[in-house]
Amino acid sequence: VKGYGLGTHFEGRNATHQMKKLTLEDLKAFRDHLRIPITDEQLEADPYAPPYYHPGVDSPEIKYLLERRRELGGNVPERREKHAPVKLPAASSYAVAKKGSGKQMAATTMAFVRLLKDLMRDKDFGDRLVPIVPDESRTFGMDAFFPSAKIYNPDGQNYLSVDRDLMLAYKESPAGKLIHPGINEAGAVAAFTAAGTAYATHGEPLVPVYVFYSMFGFQRTGDSFWAAADQLTRGFVIGATAGRTTLTGEGLQHADGHSPILASTNPAVKTYDPAYGYEIGHIMRRGLEEMYGEGSEDRNLMYYLTVYNEPIIQPAEPENLDVEGVIRGIYRVAESAAEGPKTQILASGVSVPWALEAQKLLAEDWGVSADVWSVTSWTELRRDGLAAEEEAFLNPGAERRVPFVTQQLAGTEGPVVAVTDYMKAVPDQIRQFVPNEFASLGADGFGFSDTRAAARRYFKNDTHSIVVRTLALLAASGSVGSDIPAYAMDRYKLLEVNAGTTGGAGGDA
């Protein structure tokens, strides 16, 4: 009963949140109900400050409570900072992320899984990784983990699996590393939290890596991630089949256009939208360094990486890569050699290849020179920009720190077109920190379509939409003819959904 024991004004009236004070009569009734040895005179002395009662350290009640607490391992809350030493993975464990995919097409999900597999093989660190997949292990290409890492079951495998004739069949074991809680996202986040706090609760650092369809994380179980942050959980959260247009055939429940926005509301979560495997390698390495490396200032972090199921040729890591740019949120991935009016295309995740196609079309069809930037984290760029504003606000007269995104784009010419496979609010996070004229392309609304290309044409965030939006901004400034945007729209049939060509039909990870 809500309000049990608090007297007739409270008990069973479901008014607890509206009731702010106990009357003197309520206090006396409460005292009588719990048989607390406090006199009427003590309560009447100051009804607004009733005395606290302690039965004494030798009382049976206190002795019982302390004995139970000792059996349970000590007082709570207690934050235990000491834990077993952690030797982070060797640099060689990240080599697979740098290689690219050669002539083979591979989605960023597969690039991530290959990296995770090598990290799990690291002799000093691999046993600390805890992959968690509530569903779709095969979709993510993680069935390769079954024979070697095995699925954790304290009782071992006690059934015949339906896939037992396959080479990569289900294998359960008390020594299994893979947590497979069934189609149970709440249970998966609970496992993630348990593993991600083991450094404090058991003195043994574990690094959970929770992989799920991206809609099924911060939308379905966002409150559980908030609780995980409250418990200072550390680990990686992988939103696979990310983006609003990469899984159109399975219905709107998979059309994630907003998980980075939801994740941005959690202060403990760092959100990344990498385009390439080598970006994933650097991001995960930095994440482990922040969680368990030397000299880290904030260890209690969850890294959210969105990865895609759309195969592309994964490029090898370029020489002289701007690693700081990758980690902090933006770096230039391709500078245009074309002559003509300048513009900047900012893209993240699966949209970076579209931006590179648009760069080529702008140069060949319209004589426009467009540089392409990979934005690995719109959210981290925004947080850095807001922090710079806060520092200036609290230190009037001091030299203002320039936000990182502003530094990166300093000296660039022409308007900025920002594109993602998410709603426009995701790239709009950095709008106030970009010195150039700014326009965003994204996937706002439901927009269900039978193909990726049609969905992207519907949302107007595909390759041709990038080109036309860029031309429109250049026309507004007089850098190209005012009739050019309309001509380009007609040329590319921008208003015809079925005329879209951006993205392949394949869906394998």
Image (spheres, rainbow, N blue to C red):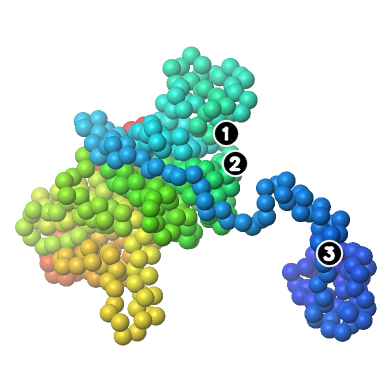
Specify which label sits upstream in the sequence, 3 or 2.
3
Residue 79's place in the image compared with 47, above or below, is above
Instruction: Mark yes or no: residue 259 visible.
Output: no
Which amino acid lies under the numbered mark 3 shown in the image of this protein?
Answer: Gly
- Marks 1,2: beta carbons within 8 A: yes
For disc 3, the marked residue is: 56
Residue most extreme to the top:
165
Say which quadrant the C terminus sits in: top left
For disc 1, the marked residue is: 182
Other-residue count near label 2 (Cα within 10 Å), few / some / many at <14 / 14–19 / ≥20: some
Q: Nearer the viewer, mark 3 or mark 1?
A: 3
Question: Is residue 17 rendered to the left or right of residue 104?
Answer: right
Q: Nearer the viewer, mark 3 or mark 2?
A: 3
Q: Report, in whole angstroms, how far the alpha carbon at label 3 lies from the one at label 1.
A: 49 Å
Between residues 474 and 314, which one lies in front from this camera angle? Answer: 314
Q: Give me the residue at 23% from left, 66% from top.
A: 407
Q: Report, in whole angstroms, how far the alpha carbon at label 1 lies from the one at label 2.
A: 9 Å
For disc 2, the marked residue is: 187
Other-residue count near label 1 (Cα within 10 Å), few / some / many at <14 / 14–19 / ≥20: few
State the image coordinates of residue 291 (x, y, percent, origin top left).
Answer: 43, 51
Other-residue count near label 3 (Cα within 10 Å), few / some / many at <14 / 14–19 / ≥20: few
SS of the residue at dot 3? loop
Q: Give me the residue at 21% from left, 43% from top.
A: 317
Residue 2: image quadrant is bottom right
Question: Is residue 446 rendered to the left or right of residue 357?
Answer: right
State the image coordinates of residue 457 (x, y, percent, origin top left).
Answer: 31, 48
Between residues 58 and 500, which one lies in front from this camera angle? Answer: 58
Question: Is residue 100 rendered to the left or right of residue 67?
Answer: left
State the image coordinates of residue 296 (x, y, percent, origin top left).
Answer: 39, 57
Say which quadrant the N terminus sits in: bottom right
